[in-house]
Image (tube, rainbow, N blue to C red):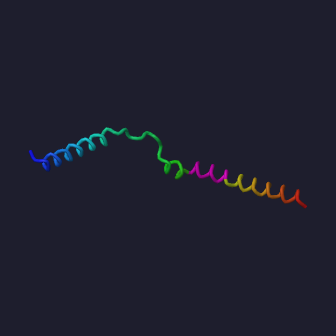
């Protein structure tokens, strides 16, 4: 067997090993993030959090602006 044939055979064996490793990888059991974000109740909660954040920003601005005058 020549060196080139051995190299080709090694490459083929490496490819088979890599393919088996890919097949053996466990599949993730988590929920996809898009499922959560494309959900109406999640949108409602995020909208409520955004409005609370906006309210707190306005209040904190008013407190600090009012205390400086």
Rendered-image quadrant of the N terminus: top left
Q: Residue at x 24, y 44 (%)?
A: 14
- x and y percentages locating residue 41 in the rendered image: 58, 48
What residue sits 88% from the left and 56% below the top? 67
Residue 28 relative to residue 7: left or right? right
Secondary structure mostly taken by the magenta-highlighted segment of the chain: helix
Q: Residue furthest right?
A: 69
Residue nearest the viewer, comparing 64 with 57: 64
Q: Is residue 19 left or right of residue 8?
A: right
The extreme left residue here reads 1
- 67 in magenta: no
- The single residue placed furthest to the front in the displayed view is 3
Magenta stretch: residue 44 in it?
A: yes
Tell me where residue 25 appears, x and y as whole percent: 35, 39
- Image quarter of residue 64: bottom right
In percent of width and height, residue 69 lies at 90, 61
Left-right relation of 28 to 11: right
Coordinates of residue 47 in the picture (x, y in percent): 64, 54
Tell me what residue is drawn at x 75 percent, y 53 percent. 56
Start and end of the magenta stretch? 40-49
Asked if residue 34 lies left or right of residue 22, the reply is right
Name the residue nearer the viewer: 54 or 9. Answer: 9
Where residue 59 sits, quadrant-wise, is bottom right
């Amino acid at each position: 067997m020549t060196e080139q044939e051995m190299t080709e055979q090694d490459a083929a064996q490496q490819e088979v090993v890599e393919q088996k490793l890919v097949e053996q990888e466990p599949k993730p059991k988590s929920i996809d993030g898009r499922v959560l974000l494309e959900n109406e109740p999640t949108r409602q909660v995020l909208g409520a959090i955004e409005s609370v954040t906006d309210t707190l920003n306005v209040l904190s601005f008013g407190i600090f602006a009012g205390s400086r005058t």
